[in-house]
Image: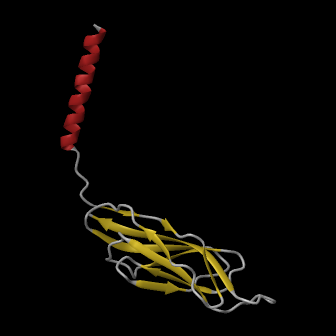
Amino acid sequence: MKAVRKRVYISIIASLMACLMFVMPVMAAGSSYKSMTTVKLNAMNGNISQKSQVGAGSYLGTTRSITKVEIYVNVDRNSDPFIVHVISPEGTHYSFEPSTTTNKTYTTTIFNGEDPEGKWTVYIENEGISYKPNQIYPTSTATITVKPYYNWS
């Protein structure tokens, strides 16, 4: 009797799952984001840091369009002024001067409409200025996280 009950129960559950599969709407589009963090970037005496390539991996959908990009700058204590450079996979270049006293997220729409998939290039450029007494060379150090938000279908 228990074996028959178990088979009936499994048959009912399988039937319900099959019905739900045909009734549930298919998600044809959506929105998402991907977070990519650089290695620690160091620049000194008016020069640029190494260029960190972030990205790759898979993105949702076959057609994607960036809606905004958040750039989180984690500044090392005692960093001198610098400029952050972000280059999208499509080649759009965005640069800005972040705070050197506070870790902060900056938002831009300059990449809107671009496909986020591919390699992003991120680096910092030391401005060649130091406000610290007795420092021979100005130095800047930061880690950057790029987070493109995008719609997909």
Residue 41 falls left or right of residue 150: right
As rendered, which of 120 and 18 lies closer to the eye? Answer: 120
Instruction: Tally the numbered discs.
Output: 0
As rendered, which of 106 and 94 lies closer to the eye? Answer: 94
Quadrant of the drawing holding the N terminus = top left
Quadrant of the drawing holding the C terminus = bottom left
Name the residue: 20% across, 30% down.
Answer: 15
Residue 19 falls left or right of residue 109: left
Considering every residue shown, the one lying at the far front of the view is 50
Name the residue: 46% across, 70% down.
Answer: 54
Task: Give the image's coloring scheme.
Answer: secondary structure
Residue 70: give x, y in percent of width and height.
Answer: 47, 73
Considering every residue shown, the one lying at the far right of the view is 134
Residue 48 picture quarter: bottom right
Residue 3: give x, y in percent of width and height.
Answer: 28, 11
Residue 32: give x, y in percent of width and height.
Answer: 37, 62
Q: Is residue 28 above or below residue 98?
A: above
Residue 6 falls left or right of residue 138: left
Residue 97: give x, y in percent of width and height.
Answer: 57, 86
Name the residue: 65% across, 92% down.
Answer: 128
Q: Is residue 151 above or below residue 107?
A: above
Name the residue: 67% across, 74% down.
Answer: 76
Q: Is residue 112 above or below residue 1?
A: below
